[in-house]
Amino acid sequence: MPFAGNTLAQSGRTKPTPTPTPTRITGPSVFSTPSPTPAPTPRPRVVVTPTPNEEVERVESTLVPIPVSVLDANGRSVSNLKDTDFELRIDGKVVEIGEVFRSESPIRLAMLFDNSSSVATARDFEREAAVRFFKRVIRPDIDTAALFSVADSTRLEQPLTRDVGMLTRAIMAFPPPAGATALFDGILEAADYLRSSTGRRVVVIVSDGEDTYSRNESTLSEVIKQLQIHNCLVYVVRTKDFEYFKLTGNRTGNANIRALDAERRMLEITAQTGGAVYSPIDEREMNAAFDSISAALSQQYVLAYYPDDDKGKSGQVREIAVTIKGKPSLTIRSRKGYVVR
């Protein structure tokens, strides 16, 4: 699961007192619950080497958390897999999985709400979608969420909170949509905002997906890289199909090149981080999308991978591939890479 930072260290011979952990499928726990935030953090593998001065040399070990959602042919979450069912490949090579957990850790979520002029047609639908999302997905006693508005600049409208009412009031207080769309800038800001949060980091984008104003350095590849560095999982509630449906009565229209490029970019971002794109056109489809996201987050597996060959590769992107042995009909959603720190 995503944690506050990739590199973990512990010194000395005394182990901390164990605290409640997520459900483990097998193997010794690498998680403990930090204080004061009630979110589990991984315990590193530690090598202790006495020095001549009777001191203890601290050796750091890097954990790469890999959240995995597994779906059957009907799109339902599969929750009965064992640790031995998973196979993990890094750069095409089968590697050892440290542990496999069923994730019960808190969610730290940042929602990006597109409030630019390009979504004027879908504005009320977007607002309803955002409110419904918070009410259906956020667990008030466990999860926290923040709200950003995105137009030609990104603005934090509500810092992380467990209070869904505060998030709802922030959404309802938005001014009318106006301006261009700096969506990539917004994604980078949200990922950076979550970087110090413990728990699973999730970015939800409610937008038509178009970007017309981001800085030149905010490229698709840079956005994906930063999301991978900060261990963020991305879901998109895309409003373009609703706009087409409202204007033409058809689910899709004659999309222009900008709209097609936007769709491809959202699909790439979610595929690389392990999320998904949903394009509801009415309340029924909207509720189904949120139910799917909620099920995915509540029934994820988390593979704990400890690299042993990252030395000298700082900054490189390493490819991740997860498969389920002997079950090719299952659909696996997981991050497709990590950046060596």
Image: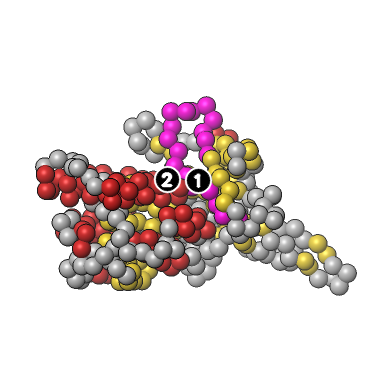
| Residue 83 percent across, percent down from the top left | 56, 38
Residue 96 horizontal side relative to residue 194, left or right: right
Q: Which mark is residue 34?
A: none
| Residue 189 percent across, percent down from the top left | 41, 66
State the residue at coordinates (77%, 66%).
57
| Residue type at tag 2 | Ala
What element does badge 1 sit on?
A: loop
Range of residues picked out in magenta: 322-340
What element does badge 2 sit on?
A: helix
| Residue linked to disc 2 | 271
Q: Counting other residues with Cα less than 10 Å from the Cα at mark 2, is it few (<14), some (14-19), or many (20 or more)?
A: some
State the residue at coordinates (40%, 47%).
268
Residue 46 horizontal side relative to residue 324, left or right: right
- Say which label, 2 or 1, has the lower sequence index: 2
- Cα–Cα span, label 2 and label 1: 7 Å
Q: Is residue 333 magenta?
A: yes
Residue 289 horizontal side relative to residue 51, left or right: left
| Residue linked to disc 1 | 336
| Residue type at tag 1 | Lys
Q: Is residue 47 visible?
A: yes
Q: Are marks 2 and 1 in contact (CB under 8 Å)?
A: yes
State the residue at coordinates (62%, 62%).
8
* Image quarter hosting the C terminus: bottom right
